[in-house]
Image: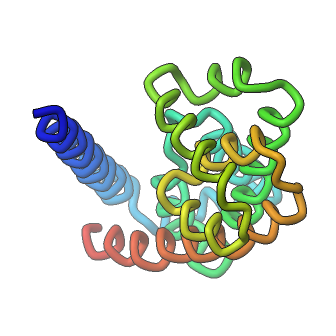
Amino acid sequence: MRLNSKVKSTARKILAAVLVMALTYAIMALVLRAIGLENAQHYVHQAGIWSPVLFVLLCAASLIIAPLSGSSLYIMGGALFGKETSLLLSYIATLLGCSANFWISRKLGRRVASRFIGRSHLEELDQFTDRIKHHHSVFYMVILMPLSQDIVSYAIGLTKVRYSVFLLALAISGLLIVGAYIYLGTSLLEQMI
């Protein structure tokens, strides 16, 4: 009986995530259609260095405040900056944001980290922390990161895993995750515009 309710809960979460993603894509497509992709790209280009700096800061902040999702920012960045530039900027933001998560939890502890991830994600944080305590390998962390990069980063900071090991796992998984969002997500968005 308990397993059945857990499956239903997981199914609801997946359905909610799919609906939020579909709604986000629809909104981005409508906004870019209304403004015009070329016009939006022109505005970004005119802002000079401030556009990429603001983009990196927003993406990093979306990872630090875990209930937010940076994936839609990565996809929008792919449309506005171009896929290659957005990949570089998003990758830098991922390294900065997840590193900040690691150090927040390492230096300030679970109580402070839980404020950044939100109470609804505390169980997830504890599950990831438990898993990582038993598996310190880079490979295992690379496999876990795509599940919830931001929360996993907080969880790893609560363990005895060295930052250099975490950073190696993050560098590998971050490139894969960001690349998938930008190349697949932006291509889908461009089809919708």
Q: Name which quarter of the figure residue 113 lies in.
A: top right
Give the residue at x 60% y 43%: 130
Image position, residue 188 (x, y; %)? 32, 73
Give the residue at x 77% y 59%: 95
Q: How many marks?
A: 0
Image position, residue 157 (x, y; %)? 77, 43
Give the residue at x 69% y 49%: 133
Image position, residue 8 (x, y; %)? 14, 39
For residue 37, say whether it is visible: yes
Point out the image quarter for the C terminus.
Answer: bottom left
For residue 88, say whether it is visible: no
Does residue 86 sit above or below 36 in this rendering?
A: below
Q: Nearer the viewer, residue 184 or 153?
A: 153
Does residue 53 sit above or below 3 in this rendering?
A: below
Q: Name which quarter of the figure residue 93 lies in.
A: bottom right
Give the residue at x 31% y 58%: 29
